[in-house]
Amino acid sequence: MDKLRVFLDTNVIISYLQGNAEVKDLFLDEILEKVHYVVSPVVYQELIFASNQMEKRDALRTQADFAKVDRYVEVVSLETSKIKVDSKNLRGLRNRLVHANDILILQTAVSSCDYLLTLDKKLLEIEKMDSMRIVSPTEYFHLVEVQR
């Protein structure tokens, strides 16, 4: 069985590092057997800044949790040859999303993953881009459970 390719949005990783129960199982062995996690350099940069702020506020659980992210998450670059430029859809996305980084994140996720796992309500409203589904943690863990 091929592993599901799952793009982790920054907010999911930060929630994990903060001990959020909704995403606490991300790196369990039985989950890791079924999935391959991916982020983009944009997400990794956001994560570095956020974890630095969390450390300053003593909100980062443990360095071991951050080490799991480093160990089990692949950083992939956006393949420019796979970018689909549809100016009408791009304008629509830009108007719906809060941050310009979200467009880069979406393009990277679409070109390399089956799912985008996020807590962002605006991204969740999109539901699907091309063949990639955008899912919440609840939906994601149900999908992984069903995937046998």
Image (cartoon, grey):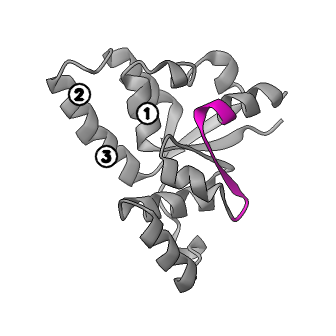
Is 90 left, or right, of 30 in this rendering? left
* Residue drawn 66% across the image and 44% down it: 5
Mark 1 neighbour density, 10 Å: few (under 14) some (14–19) many (20 or more): many
Tag 3 residue: 46
Kind of element beneath mark 3: helix
Displayed quadrant of residue 6:
top right
Q: Position of residue 12 (x, y in %)?
A: 47, 35
1 or 3: tag closer to the N-terminus = 1
Helix, strand or loop at mark 2: helix
Q: Which residues are magenta?
A: 130-139
Q: Position of residue 110 (x, y in %)?
A: 61, 60
Q: Check contact, mark 2 vs mark 1: CB within 8 A.
A: no
Q: Amino acid at mark 3?
A: Glu
The span from disc 3 to disc 2 (Cα, nearest Å) is 12 Å
Q: Residue at x 44, y 29 (%)?
A: 69
Taking the spot 61% from the left edge, 56% from the top edge, the residue there is: 112
Kind of residue at badge 2: Met
User: At label 1, which amino acid type do we have?
Assistant: Ile
Say which mark, if any, is on residue 54: 2
Res 1 → quadrant: top right
Report if the CB atoms under discs 3 and 2 are less than 8 Å apart: no
